[in-house]
Every structure is written in C-alpha cells, then in structure tokens.
Image (cartoon, rainbow, N blue to C red):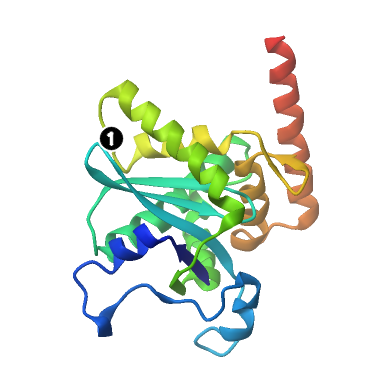
Amino acid sequence: MIIFNCSDNATAFFNHGRSAERLVVSQAPSANREDDSAHLTNLDGSEVELSQWLIDVQQVEGKSVIFAIEEYSLYSMVFADMQPGNTEDFLKLFFERWLNNMQDYGESFGVLTQEGQPKMLKQLFMVHGEYRFYQRGMDSADEHLQTVSDIFTSKVEEIGSLPDNGEQAAAFDDLCNQLRCMQDGEHFYPFERMLGYWLPTCCEQRPSQVKYLLAHIATLRDEQTAKLH
C-alpha cells in the first residue's frame, strides 16, 4: 500500500472541485507515520507493506507541478502541467513512471528485461495496488524536496519550457536521483536505495543478488569518479 502524504498545497490540489463527501485527501489516522500499519490492512485483511511518499504541488511557469519523494530512499519523481482534481491522471503517471524508471535502471545493469516487465507490473500491484491520500507532512524529506524543486525550476528556466511527462521528465528524475544525499549520518544515492527496494519487492530477487548488484554499481561509480580526477 502506498501512502501519499500531502502538503497543504497538494491537499487543495487533489480535493479541488470536490464535495465534502468525495474528498480524495483525508485526515491521517495518526500524525506519526509509523502508526499507519496499526490502522491499515489490505482488502483481504492481510498486513500491509507501506511505502510512504511526500507529495507537494508547486506553480512553475503558471502550471501545477507535482513533486513526489519517497521517505526512505528520497527517490523523487516530478509530474508537470497537471490538472487540479484529476487524481486518475496522477496515479496513472505515477505507477507508469515508477515502473519504467526502474525498468531502465534494471536493464542498464543487466538484471531486468522487457520480457519480465508484465510479471514485475503484476507484483507491483499486488504489493502497492492500494493507496491512501492523507493530509500530513514529512519533515524528513522537506530539505530534499527543496533541492529537487530548485533544480527543476532552474532547468525549466534554462530550457524555456516544462518537460513532458514522458522521456523528458524521466531524464529529470534520473538527474535528481543520482544526487548524493545524507540521512541519519549515512551517504547514499536515491536511485540505488530505490533499486535495492524494488528488486526484491517487485522482482523477487534474492537479498544476496541485490547486495551484489549494489556493490557493483558502487564500484562503477568509483571508477567513473577516478577517471574525472
């Protein structure tokens, strides 16, 4: 299950034009995200595996831009020129982009193929096919949100237009997800943390395989860094 923790701007955006009985974003059952598992179960009554995302909406070039950042990995995705109240388009783009971005990373490192994508999609919706929109902040991701927002605004000014919600936006995601971050005293790269979550969760890869891959990625990065100096 995915929890979309919506800022005030995002809450107003998704609830736009809706009556009180049809609101998309509701009050969270608890101010503490760690309590969510105690309040939520899957439709079949089983225990949920939660993925917590911060959602914010900002105006860029007079258009609504949605920023989505996952709590643990700080993995981010940006959706430009979105229409207020259109939750369906956001959800479609969110799952499509997440899947395609992970597919691209997996193919580039030789661990995923196009033939395996249908099975991966099925597994994704088995784990995260359900979702909730809550009005609630996420202090742990606020600083990274500001970084991503600043880079996005700068790129739009440089290019002169918003990216489309296809390859152009995916390229921007890749740029931000290769930024070196620090959380709880540990340095990491968002795309690596997300890939480390995705492969066992949606591709049923063994922990030993994932550990080997992430070590291989780190080695490649160190080699590239060495060449630059």
Image point 71% across, 12% down: which residue?
Answer: 227
Residue situated in front as seen by the camera: 114 or 61:
61
Residue 106: x, y in percent? 58, 43
Say left or right for 211 vs 36.
Answer: right
Residue situated in front as seen by the camera: 160 or 165:
160
The residue at the far top in this view is 229
Image point 63% across, 62% down: which residue?
Answer: 201
The residue at the far left in this view is 17
- What amino acid is at disc 1? Leu
- The correct choice, above or below, for 211 with respect to 31 in the image is above
Q: Quadrant of residue 85?
A: bottom left
Residue situated in front as seen by the camera: 142 or 49:
142
- The correct choice, above or below, for 12 with respect to 220 in the image is below
Residue 138: x, y in percent? 55, 59
Residue 161: x, y in percent? 25, 30
Say left or right for 187 vs 165.
Answer: right
Image point 35% across, 34% down: which residue?
Answer: 168
Residue situated in front as seen by the camera: 156 or 191:
156
Q: Bin the neighbour count of mark 1 within 10 Å (Cα to Cα): few under 14, some 14-19, many 20 and up.
A: many
The residue at the far bottom in this view is 45
The total of numbered circles placed on residues is 1
Q: Which residue is labeled 1 in the image?
A: 162
Q: Quadrant of residue 204?
A: bottom right
Say left or right for 182 vs 90.
Answer: right
Question: Quick one: SS at disc 1?
Answer: loop
Residue 160: x, y in percent? 26, 24
Say left or right for 22 vs 79.
Answer: left
Question: Quadrant of the image for the C terminus?
Answer: top right
- The correct choice, above or below, for 203 with respect to 74 in the image is below
- Determine if residue 113 is in view: no
- The correct choice, above or below, for 41 with respect to 130 in the image is below
- Determine if residue 5 is in view: yes
